[in-house]
Amino acid sequence: MSELETSPSRSVSGALIGVIAVALLIGVGGLVWTYVLASRLTRQEAALNAANEQSAKLAAELRETDARLKVTSQEMGQSLGLTQKQLEARTQEVLQREQVDSQRLEKAQKVASQQLTAVSSDVSAVKTDVGGVKTDVAKTQSDLATAVGQLQSIQGDVSGHTSLIARNHDELEILKHKGDRNFYEFTLVKGQRKPVGTVSLELKKADAKKSRFTMVVYSDDKNYEKKDRNLNEPLQFYGGKDPALYEIVVNSVSAKNTVTGYLSVPKTAPVPPSIQ
């Protein structure tokens, strides 16, 4: 009987001890957590106090600076003979002027940018035009070479010299573009002596039916008679201080005792005073 009675008491005692132990653990944990929170709160309070002190310091410095600025403004206004209101108005005027200048600068920069874009576009267009001109020049040179190749080459009456001749005005223009000689066109009437280039020419005879003529050339105090010659026949002679080969070609003979043609001289030959 006594053993049965003591067993429940022991069970109750063990449970009570467990409850007490748990309560102690909870209490100790609570104390530790309370300490941790207290430490954090202390640090935060210290930081807040420091921030408040810094804020107060900055506020004091700001008040001091504002006071100094006011004193400086007053002194400046007094030195300039301006009141505080006038000084503030002048300050606003300066600020507005700076804003206007800034807007003008921005507008000028925008215009300059647009102009630069336009110039770049124009440069591109010019490059395109230059490319087209180069193509045209190359084509013109090719056409000129072809046209020159189609001109008739005839042997002259001096030393068997062969040269290209023009049979009309259009072919003469081709020879002019060739660029190696100067050309002087003429029209002669029978019996009249006429200066052509640096020489003089005189038509002695003209036969329109047979397309033949006789001409006298005056050059360097000398004269050369080209008698009974044909159309488009190179009539050659040497002239100038440094003798150069001159050439006369008559392209037409009319019934009115008139001939037309041209005189061809080297680029190095003397030039008439009237066109120097």
Image: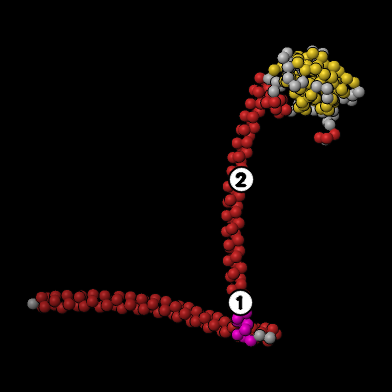
What mark, if any, has residue 123 been given in the picture? 2
Q: Residues within 10 Å of mark 2 (few under 14, many from 20)?
A: few
Q: Secondary structure at mark 2?
A: helix
Report the quarter where the C terminus lies.
top right
Q: Position of residue 22 (x, y in %)?
A: 26, 75
Main SS of residues in magenta: helix
Indicate the quadrant where residue 137 lies.
top right
Q: What residue is shown at x 61% (from left), y 33% (from top)? A: 135
In this rendered view, identify the residue nearer to me: 170 or 64. 170
Is residue 186 highlighted in magenta? no
How far is the residue under mark 2 from the one under mark 1? 44 Å
Q: What residue is shown at x 73% (from left), y 19% (from top)? A: 255
| Residue 156 seen | no
Q: Amino acid at mark 2?
A: Val
Nearer the observer: mark 2 or 1; the answer is: 2
Q: Is residue 188 left or right of residue 81?
A: right
Q: Is residue 41 left or right of residue 203?
A: left
Q: Secondary structure at mark 1?
A: helix
Report the quarter where the N terminus lies.
bottom left
Q: Position of residue 113 (x, y in %)?
A: 58, 55
Find disc 1 in the rendering and name its residue. Answer: 93
Q: Residues within 10 Å of mark 1 (few under 14, many from 20)?
A: few
Q: What residue is shown at x 58% (from left), y 66% (from top)? A: 103
Is residue 84 highlighted in magenta? yes
Q: Earlier in the sequence, mark 2 or mark 1?
A: 1
In the image, the segment drawn in magenta is: 83-90
In this rendered view, identify the residue nearer to me: 256 or 17. 256
Indicate the quadrant where residue 178 lies.
top right
Q: What residue is shown at x 77% (from left), y 26% (from top)? A: 186
Q: Position of residue 225 (x, y in %)?
A: 85, 16
In this rendered view, identify the residue nearer to me: 259 or 79. 259
Indicate the quadrant where residue 175 lies.
top right
